[in-house]
Amino acid sequence: MEVKLASSYGFCFGVKRAIEIAQKHKNSATMGPLIHNQKEIGRLKDDYNVGLYENLDDVQVDDTVIIRTHGIPKNDLKELKQKDAKVINATCPFVTTPQQIVKNMSSEGYSILIFGDENHPEVKGVQSYCDDDVHVILEPDELKNITFKYDKIATVAQTTRKKEKYLEIVNHLILRNKEVRVFNTICDATFENQDAARDLSKEVDIMIVIGGKNSSNTKQLLTICEENTTSYLIEDEKELNYTWFENKNICGITAGASTPDWIIQNVVNEIERI
Amino acid sequence: MEVKLASSYGFCFGVKRAIEIAQKHKNSATMGPLIHNQKEIGRLKDDYNVGLYENLDDVQVDDTVIIRTHGIPKNDLKELKQKDAKVINATCPFVTTPQQIVKNMSSEGYSILIFGDENHPEVKGVQSYCDDDVHVILEPDELKNITFKYDKIATVAQTTRKKEKYLEIVNHLILRNKEVRVFNTICDATFENQDAARDLSKEVDIMIVIGGKNSSNTKQLLTICEENTTSYLIEDEKELNYTWFENKNICGITAGASTPDWIIQNVVNEIERI
């Protein structure tokens, strides 16, 4: 089987940075899974003894606690610092930005609108930086159920969301409010991987998307590839099913922003053997 | 001929207010034409001796100077005050708002984008409140020729512009800049007249649009009516041409935001006689 890799795939800047930070702090532990990839978390545990706290109560004085790439809620961070733990912040800088924007805009008297999934850890963290009026939506339709406390609105987006949908929401806001302060907090890395996956999926017989099944950006890659060809999402090479490749000649490969190169390489090796 | 008036037409809030101010200040003069309607300016001259300055040098100490609804450039206002003239500000509050926004945003380090016609007095006035980086455009296409000095952009719109086009421009900005602070300075009054004109023009045989031929909002009313029926723009009843009404049964009427009721009434009376 011939294998083609997308021109852009895998680790984004924030994930690369978080893993480097974790590797520099042996015998530490992360508050929440560092990234959305169980295998890489397993590797950090095996090779660097980087563990995982289930909750804040597990943290002891003088522990070294690494904050996950998606960030954590403001009060959790405050509590960690009060415990006299050594806090190492691996929050992606592109996530710290919307956190700080929400904090500043809220204190300047803006109502806050976050475009994103309210159950996603990144969004929960960003939302926690508003002490006043904050709303989270995924669809423009949801705006009709919202009454803003103020007539000045500040908006941020979850870093991995689609720009087109963000603009739709923002346009609704502009027509209905005196001032809308729009912060484009969407990260281009996600879209570079998506554009490359879209292009590649048009010229191959099958696409394999490698990544965590709970990773938002990995699932988006699968949706994009499915528009053009038969596509499968796997976490590693053990999930490959040989029947998928019958009568296929070229296999395209892409990977989510939390998928490490060593997993991708294992998958490529396995498919090339078919 | 049967005549139907649009459900909303004529004077907007800012024009009504400016005329009331002028009528309260007999023997004054306006800096620039008070509104875009020569006939109404003539009436103010005849009935209240409200004159018109051609330029700043005409203003003498102790003169009473009325600022037009569209506003004047910041330095002109400063010069007037230095002349010890009595300055009465009839600038529409909906125009003062973008002037102040541009002033504040510019001093806070934003590049300014104005959506409007750079030759329109309102836009010239608003633009003058920026001491730093300011650009004026009418089409999203023009953005490609602009290099903003800062990565934070604040935008305002000429009060009489179309919202749809403003959103197009704003969307381009959001995709290309970290922060876009969007102020919706478009005045609804213009659109109430436009919506009513659109509805009426669909159910009549001919539309007469009454207003100044240099009035931006009057010309927009004509364009909207022409989409649905034969339409003519006139400044008063003397411009009516009887051949227009041959084989027509119902005539719709609308009027620009600077058109006084007495001119509209004269036109209605004349058409009803046909």
Image (spheres, coloured by chain):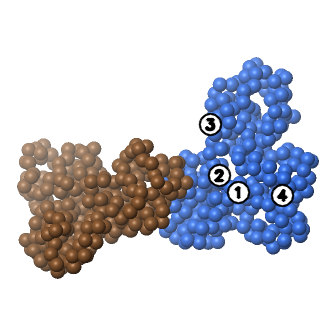
Chain colours: A brown, B blue
Work out whether mark 4 precedes mark 1 in sequence or the reverse, and give the earlier one: 4
Q: Chain of mark 3?
A: B
Give whichever of B33, A246 is nearer the camera: B33
In the picture of the structure, the residue carrying the numbered disc 4 is B30
Q: Position of residue A29 (x, y in %)?
A: 15, 72
Q: Secondary structure at mark 4?
A: strand
Q: What residue lies at 73% left-to-right and 57% top-to-bottom? A: B91
Q: Chain of mark 4?
A: B
Circle 4 or circle 1, nearest the eye: 4
Q: Secondary structure at mark 2?
A: loop
In the picture of the structure, the residue carrying the numbered disc 2 is B159
Circle number at residue B195: 3
Q: What residue lies at 55% left-to-right and 68% top-to-bottom? A: B110
In the picture of the structure, the residue carrying the numbered disc 1 is B122
Looking at the rendered structure, the kind of residue marked 3 is: Asp
Q: Position of residue B218 (x, y in %)?
A: 72, 42
Label 1 crowd bin: few (<14), some (14–19), many (20+), radius 10 Å: many
- C-alpha separation, residue under disc 4 versus residue under disc 2: 21 Å
Q: Chain of mark 2?
A: B
